[in-house]
Image (spheres, rainbow, N blue to C red):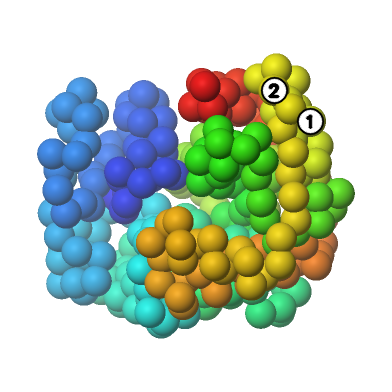
């Protein structure tokens, strides 16, 4: 039995879908089961509760030899590191209590760099805590998600531009969430692996934001331009337009700045870490229609 946390989230929902399609025995741990599509809900076991409640989490894990664990996303933290640490400590204790054998944890790339990288540092803190749970762990060390472009829809529609505090010519690994989900599912259904390791998920190729703007222009028939902005201006835009806390806005901006300074260079791309979905394929399926 596999327990899936955050089954309504970006990665969790896709992981759940793939596991069900493959006929796996799955239990979900969720606050509100009504948010799960009915056709999936009828094929899984349901445990209700909070990821911050050790008793409820432990109970949900009973009888499950494998766990997919992801800290829920939010932009309202007042202390980003403490937020991730809190979820990870409860999860680690629940894993110990239930005797769970294997854990797949959604982390981020660049861990070996030891750079202070905002939200990514918080994810790495969580990884260290999960690694102490006594279970075998595969931490998926992911780069920027293609899906982060969806937060730029308003400026793309209004101005034909998008903005980040990163050099537009700097090429970085980026990945589709569905490819992360596929890799997670591979580990979740494989009962043979042991030990504690990080596993990079790099996407198909390193790409710059100027490259993405060019491909976006080709797909939409509109002139799309990327512009690098200062850290100060990016923080202001998050506070003004995305209802974030100041702590989250600063942490996200620190993350993007350090990515632009080479955070991911410590994890070389290999055939095993390279995933298939290209940015052009992803934009065709997920972005172009939203820009009209």
Residue at 43% from the left image edge and 57% from the top image edge: 242
Q: State the separation of the CA atoms marked 2 and 1.
A: 10 Å
Element type where label 1 sits in the image: helix
Residue at 71% from the left image edge and 60% from the top image edge: 229
Work out whether residue 68 or residue 30 is closer to the camera in this orientation and state it: 30
Q: Where residue 179 appears, x then y in whole percent?
A: 57, 36
Q: Is residue 190 left or right of residue 214?
A: left
Q: Is residue 260 left or right of residue 53?
A: right
Q: Which quadrant: the N terminus?
A: top left
Does residue 88 appear anywhere in the picture? Answer: no
Residue at 46% from the left image edge and 66% from the top image edge: 239
Quick one: label 1, few (<14), some, or many (20+) residues within 10 Å?
Answer: some
Name the image quarter holding residue 119: bottom right
Q: Is residue 133 left or right of residue 3?
A: right
Q: Where residue 228 appears, x then y in whole percent?
A: 75, 56
Work out whether residue 126 or residue 96 is closer to the camera in this orientation and state it: 126
According to the picture, the residue beneath numbered tag 1 turns out to be 214
Does residue 26 appear anywhere in the picture? Answer: yes
The mark that comes first in sequence, 2 or 1, is: 1
Nearer to us of marks 2 and 1 is 2
Q: Where residue 61 appears, x then y in whole percent?
A: 24, 59
- In the displayed structure, would residue 216 be above or below residue 229? above
Q: Where residue 130 appears, x then y in whole percent?
A: 45, 72
According to the picture, the residue beneath numbered tag 2 turns out to be 222
Q: Which mark is residue 47?
A: none
Element type where label 2 sits in the image: loop
Residue at 47% from the left image edge and 71% from the top image edge: 248
């Amino acid at each position: 039995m596999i327990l899936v946390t955050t089954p309504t989230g970006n990665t969790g929902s896709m992981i759940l879908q793939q596991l069900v399609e493959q006929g796996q025995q799955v239990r979900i741990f969720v606050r509100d089961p009504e948010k799960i599509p009915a056709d999936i809900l009828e094929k899984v076991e349901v445990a209700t509760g909070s990821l911050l409640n050790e008793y409820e989490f432990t109970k949900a894990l009973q009888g499950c030899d494998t766990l997919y664990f992801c800290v829920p996303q939010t932009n309202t933290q007042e202390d980003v590191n403490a937020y991730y640490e809190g979820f990870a400590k409860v999860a680690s204790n629940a894993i110990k209590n239930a005797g769970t054998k294997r854990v797949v944890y959604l982390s981020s790339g660049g861990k070996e760099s030891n750079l202070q990288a905002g939200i990514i540092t918080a994810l790495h803190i969580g990884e260290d805590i999960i690694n102490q749970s006594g279970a075998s762990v595969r931490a998926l060390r992911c780069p920027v998600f293609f899906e982060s472009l969806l937060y730029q829809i308003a400026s793309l529609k209004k101005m034909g531009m998008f903005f980040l505090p990163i050099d537009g010519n700097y090429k970085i690994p980026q990945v589709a969430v569905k490819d992360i989900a596929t890799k997670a599912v591979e580990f979740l259904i494989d009962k043979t692996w042991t030990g504690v390791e990080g596993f990079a998920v790099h996407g198909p190729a390193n790409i710059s934001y100027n490259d993405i703007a060019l491909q976006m222009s080709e797909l939409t028939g509109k002139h799309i331009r990327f512009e690098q902005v200062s850290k100060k201006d990016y923080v202001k835009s998050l506070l003004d337009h995305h209802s974030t806390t100041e702590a989250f806005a600063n942490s996200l901006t620190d993350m993007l700045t350090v990515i632009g300074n080479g955070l991911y260079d410590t994890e070389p791309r290999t055939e095993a870490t390279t995933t298939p979905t290209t940015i052009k394929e992803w934009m065709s399926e997920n972005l172009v229609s939203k820009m009209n």
